[in-house]
Image (tube, rainbow, N blue to C red):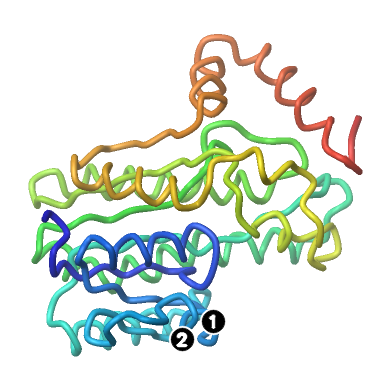
Amino acid sequence: MFFKDKVIIVTGASSGIGRALALEGLLLGARVVLAARNTKAMHEVVKGYDPEDYLIIETDVTIEEDCRQLVEKVAERFGRIDMLVNNAGVSMRALFSDVELKVIDRLMQVNFWGAVYCTKHALPWLLKSRGSLVGVSSIAGFKGLPARSGYSASKFALQGFLESLRAENLKNGLHVLIACPGFTASNIRKTALAKDGTMQGDSPRAEDQMMTAETVAKHIYKGVGKRKRTLILTRQGKLTVWLNKLLPALTDKLVYKHMAKEPDSPFK
């Protein structure tokens, strides 16, 4: 009953973890706001649900005005915001020596600035409700991954931003959760950017062997319900974070070796 009638904004809600978060929120009785650029896909997500329980808003999180209007429309419709999930994200796969800088810029715009813009405008409402601010980060926010320099940089930045907000609002009742799913079956690798900014296409990893987006969504809601600070999912993810604290040089070698096994890896 914790989420009954709570108002939840999910960015990047048209697919992957965002889609799963939107659906899980509706199942939990929340009023869910789906925000993404692809409105057609979002309408498919909520097909069969009562329109009174959701709101679809076309949003490009890289545009601050879009984020401001997103929050204003939610406040106008529901009169409150209890949870903001900064989930919108894009990945990449290329060596930094080869990548065009527009790729790094794109990742920072979506993964970091998108969260900053949405949070800036939603924060007064979250403070009023003593609600939850969630950032969907990655193990790449704890450990820099080869051929993912821009992605890791954006997630490190996101986590630093959220940790600062948590400290700033220790006495204001704001709950901040940094969720790091690890490798999750979704379309993020298919839409990952190559060195020239084009989409990668086929995933370089075995998607059917990964944690599902639906499982990730359930863990995130449980984490919010328990007001956890950090959520690190998958055994591999937990091991990577732990080893990097104790044996960083060894972890560099292990991560390099693991990532080099990907088909068509840009390094060996």
Q: Foreground residue, 27 or 231?
A: 27
Q: Identify the residue at horizontal 49%, vertical 57% (top origin).
A: 17
Say whether residue 72 is left or right of residue 217: left
Residue under label 1: 37
Estimate how packed mark 2 is, as few (under 14), some (14 to 19) or many (20 or more) residues with alpha carbons within 10 Å: some
Give the vertical position of 37 relative to 226 (above or below).
Answer: below
In contact (CB < 8 Å): disc 2 and disc 1 = yes
- Tag 1's secondary structure? loop
Q: Identify the residue at horizontal 46%, vertical 63% (top origin).
A: 18
Residue 43 image point, x, y percent: 46, 84
- Tag 2's secondary structure? strand
Q: Identify the residue at horizontal 39%, vertical 76% (top origin).
A: 34
Q: Identify the residue at horizontal 61%, vertical 55% (top origin).
A: 186
Q: Give amino acid for label 1.
A: Arg
Q: Give amino acid for label 2.
A: Glu
Which mark is on residue 58? Answer: 2
Quadrant holding the C terminus: top right
Estimate how packed mark 1 is, as few (under 14), some (14 to 19) or many (20 or more) residues with alpha carbons within 10 Å: some
Which mark is on residue 115? Answer: none
